[in-house]
Image (spheres, helix red, strand yellow):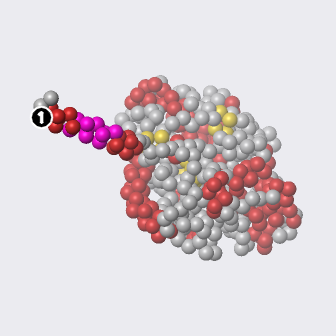
Amino acid sequence: MNKQQNILIKLIGICIMFVVVTAPSVIFAQQEKIISSYGPTNQTETFDQIKAARMAVKSERAKQHMELLNSRYDLSKKTTADVVMSGGKPVPVGPTAKLQGVTWEELNEMTPEQIKEKGWFPYKPLPFADHAEGGMLFPEMITKLLPRLVRFDLDFDLPEYILPDPAPAIYLTTRPDLGDVAKGRLITINNYYEIFNGILNPKQLEGLRLLVTQFPQQQFNATEDRRTDRPDGMLGVTCFDCHANGHTNGANHLVGDIRPQEFRHRIETPTLRGVNIQRLFGSQRALKTVEDFTEFEQRAAYFDGDICMAAKKGVNILERGSQVHFMAEFLAILDFPPVSKLNIYGKLDQKMATPSELRGEALFNGKAQCASCHPEPYYTDNSMHDLKAERFYKQELANGMMMAHDGPIKTFPLRGIKDSPPYMHDGRCFTLEDIVEYFNLIQQLHLKSEEKKDLVAFMRTL
């Protein structure tokens, strides 16, 4: 073996040793992000560092989200003075969804496969304002009244005109003679007693107190990774911060049941009116009693479904036999708003309804097949249904959210529906007109323009 061959062999050996020694680090560097069911339970960064990191991405992510909203919806204010919510706020008018290169009439004649191929479905799943972040997010009309609910990292994304009343009316099954008990007041820990003392029994009054009492939550607490500037005196949230006056204010968050993060659904706050006639609770959880739901919210949903975070941040373990029972007893007497055009069977009074409303009722029970899932008198079948909306759109990432399958969703009651925009479990339909367009496509109903208007007219009477 000559000298040059000897040198070559040594060089090859060195190269082999280099690959062996460095290979693990190379492989490690190329690994994808580890997906875990858990968040970080031991925080190594300070509050100021965490806030700075969140603020660094806030404006860009907000810009991307608003670009998505503006590409999907016409966000200009459109309301009707002829129809108002039970608290007096004008009802929003639609449809607000924007169509890209197609008309509603043309969509009406297309198959799900054709709509999916063209990418023309106007009601795809709606991402959270920053889908990588999550947590409870409150509209400005509420944070003005309750400044403790302001988050430094996120601003609410939907226009106020498509939201419910900021201080919704309250109706009680036990005292229908009183009408609206709230009378324009937002019920809080500061006024609940003076308003309801003498109307509720002691258990109901204590239940209401608990519903307006602040408890720690994932983003609203005393830890370093909270999303509020000041924890002192502003620790936590209340049930009625989202379910304002036992109804809803349009606050939203991300469902705690799903992982990884990009597959989590945006969830709009549903009304608590009429929970006494409901048999399922949670959009997908199918909890069997409102007591179960109350415990679930405190123990898990408040902390993104992370039991480790719950323990760290101060989970409030409610006592089932008294506290949960008292809260449920108050919730059970929250009534739907009274209506003048429905008879005792929940159907239209022929003498009081307009021709358009009567035609809408006939469509609701006939061609449109709404009554298949929403039968009178409360317009719910207390079940869950999978609409398989994914037939109409491709599974793709949009602003941090995967446009994936919705799965089975609870049938929400339609009584008082005009008081509760936006609609669907994630709020993707801003108005009742949007709801009609959505189901016209999903069910392939082929409704005509006048039929759609009649359906909206009927639902406004509920």
Residue 309: x %, y % from top left: 62, 57
Residue 274 makes an appearance in the image:
no
Residue 386: x %, y % from top left: 62, 32
Residue 321 makes an appearance in the image:
yes
Most common SS among magenta residues: helix
The residue wearing badge 1 is 4
Residue 50: x %, y % from top left: 47, 64
> Residue sitting at 53 percent across and 62 percent down?
43
Would residue 30 appear left or right of 253 to someone viewing this image? left
- Magenta stretch holds residue 16: yes
Magenta extent: 11-20
> Residue sitting at 48 percent across and 44 percent down?
34
The amino acid sitting under disc 1 is Gln
Task: State the SS at label 1.
Answer: helix
Q: Tell me: residue 13, above or below residue 306.
A: above
- Magenta stretch holds residue 419: no
Residue 164: x %, y % from top left: 60, 56
Q: How many marks?
A: 1
> Residue sitting at 77 percent across and 59 percent down?
318
Would residue 333 appear left or right of 267 to someone viewing this image? right
Q: Camera-side residue: 286 or 225?
A: 225
